[in-house]
Amino acid sequence: MSEIINTATVASVREIVGDWRASHRSVALVPTMGNIHAGHISLTEFAHELADRVLMTIFVNPTQFGAGEDLENYPRTLKQDMAAVKAAGTVHAVFVPKSIKAIYPYGIDEAIQVNMPPLSRELCGAFRPGHFDGVASVVLRLLNIAQPDLLILGEKDYQQLVLMERLVSDLRLPVSVLGAPTERHADGLALSSRNRYLSDDERVRAPTLHATLAGVGNAIREGERNYAILLEHAKHKLEAAGFAVDYVEVRDAKDLSVPNGRQAPRELIVLGAARIGSARLIDNVRI
Ligand code: PAF
């Protein structure tokens, strides 16, 4: 692939995408907050398989961080990010907004915010008030700026994926949302920028999150239907490994509704979020 186009303004993104469109190229958007790791690269590979042109955005979005969260400390590693993206050879252009005003022209306090439906206040949303309103606010802005054919998001952030599908369908945005599979270390830990907060000892214990969710998934696959007991055991297992558990839940994989025994069996998903040291890890396993 020739040189990656590096752009910092909305006008230049529009021009680049406009040129792609004029030559009938399909466009996939991969939004990120930077600190690019193999998980992000796998999103771009997924995007590259599906679209002629891949646009990555790197923007640490202030509106999705709550008070006391890691906005200030969130790793900003632009130089390494650009090198990693270049080495991958799957991205055609990277949009790194010059300033917050490129995304929020009236500033954060005056910004129009998306008010997401009640699902945004469940699961992770119950522990991170306003988080998904902030994610939706920035994703909507990025979609309006780039107007891609495809929006690629990771399945690791499963609630985010479902809510962004909802945003797109409710607002009738002309884009398809696709979830890319989670990239994992050999011991099962999902790749995440927040893994860098783990001490050596916490890193050894961190894969217990995935192992525990997989255990719940296996038990359900084998016919166990007492979810309450399964989830209680799962929480104890995580606590024994040193996690403070935010939640472990079984939900409908399509819309994250709470499964109801009276409905026809649907595809399920086990989701969990737990804190270990200063890292908050999330993961999920499809059943
Ligand atoms: O998943 C993320 O990294 C972020 O929530 C996203 C989608 C880039 C929006 O800031």
Image (cartoon, helix red, strand yellow):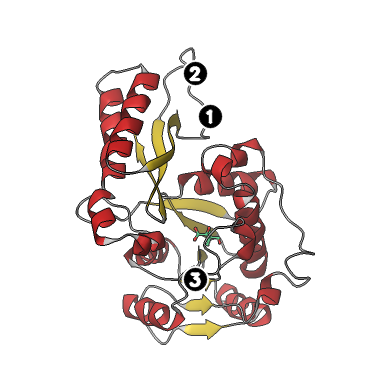
**Residue 56: mark in rendering:** 3
Q: Residue at x 52, y 52 (%)?
A: 177
Q: Where does the N terminus fall, quadrant-wise?
A: bottom left
Crowdedness near tag 2: few (<14), some (14–19) or many (≥20) residues, C-alpha within 10 Å: few
Q: Which kind of residue does numbered mark 1 sit on?
A: Ser
Whether residue 28 is visible to the viewer of this picture, yes or no, is: yes
How far apart in space, not on screen, are marks 1 and 3 (Cα)? 31 Å
How far apart in space, not on screen, are marks 2 and 1 (Cα)? 9 Å
- The percent coordinates of residue 180 (x first, y second) are 40, 53
Q: Residue at x 52, y 43 (%)?
A: 124
Whether residue 42 is visible to the viewer of this picture, yes or no, is: no
Q: Nearer the viewer, mark 1 or mark 3?
A: 1
Callout 2 touching callout 1 (CB < 8 Å):
yes
- The percent coordinates of residue 155 (x first, y second) are 42, 49
Say if 111 sits above or below 162 in the image. Answer: below
Q: Which kind of residue does numbered mark 3 sit on?
A: Met
